Image (cartoon, helix red, strand yellow):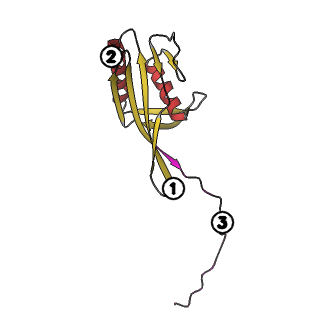
Amino acid sequence: MNQEVGSIMGYLYKLYPVQVYEEEIPQDFAVPSLYFPPASTVDGVDTVSTFQKAYVLNVKLFHENVQKAHNEAERIADTLRSRRGIIPLIQESGEDTGDFIRLSRIETRVSDDYATIVLNWTSRYWYEREDQRSIDGFKFKSGVK
């Protein structure tokens, strides 16, 4: 899991402190609970030095019934919206890095027995660069005066 998804997990857990699942949901899973499947990504060009990845994370929220699940999903989504979609990035230790993610879209959906919070954001990453010898000094001579 990357740092961004981990930060979202931690942030949503603070808003809704329930059992969290990230790999598979067991047969006898806890209710209420949150499930974080892997995020979907699409890449794209950005600048000459960076590329971007657009993420979509479908967080499943389980509760006693679908209406309660939807109500909690809406409450969480509205809290994220009221905070301008900004989620602080944290390290694995839980320490704040000072950076943040800005969600570009927050959506809730209802299925037969759970609610889904769909989170979208785009991140920028540096291309790898080969080490080059630096030019320490050079002189220009020109016949133009």
Q: Who comes first in sequence, dot 1 or dot 3? A: 1
Q: Examine the rendered structure and indicate whether residue 8 appears above or below residue 50.
A: above
Residue 105 part of the magenta-drawn span: no
Q: Which quarter of the figure has residue 91?
A: top right
Q: Amino acid at mark 2?
A: Asn
Q: Examine the rendered structure and indicate whether residue 72 appears above or below residue 132.
A: above
Instruction: Give how far apart the Cα atoms at labels 2 and 1 are.
Output: 43 Å
Q: Are marks 2 and 3 in contact (CB under 8 Å)?
A: no
Label 3 sits on residue: 134
Q: Amino acid at mark 1?
A: Ser
Q: Examine the rendered structure and indicate whether residue 141 appears above or below residue 127.
A: below
Q: Secondary structure at mark 3?
A: loop
Please provide percent x and percent y for residue 108: 34, 25
Q: Is 19 left or right of 84, judged from the image as shown?
A: right
Q: Nearer the viewer, residue 10 or 61?
A: 61
Q: Amino acid at mark 3?
A: Ser
Q: Secondary structure at mark 2?
A: helix
Q: Residue at x 65, y 65 (%)?
A: 134
Q: Who comes first in sequence, dot 2 or dot 1? A: 1
Please provide percent x and percent y for residue 70: 34, 17
Please provide percent x and percent y for residue 92: 60, 30
Q: Which tag is nearer the camera, tag 2 or tag 3?
A: 2
Label 1 sits on residue: 49
Q: Residue at x 48, y 14 (%)?
A: 18
What mark, if any, has residue 71 been given in the picture? 2
Q: Magenta stretch?
A: 123-145
Please provide percent x and percent y for residue 27: 51, 12
What mark, if any, has residue 119 been given in the picture? none
Q: Residue at x 61, y 28 (%)?
A: 93
Instruction: Give how far apart the Cα atoms at labels 2 and 3 are.
Output: 59 Å
Q: Residue at x 60, y 81 (%)?
A: 140
Q: Which tag is nearer the camera, tag 1 or tag 3?
A: 1
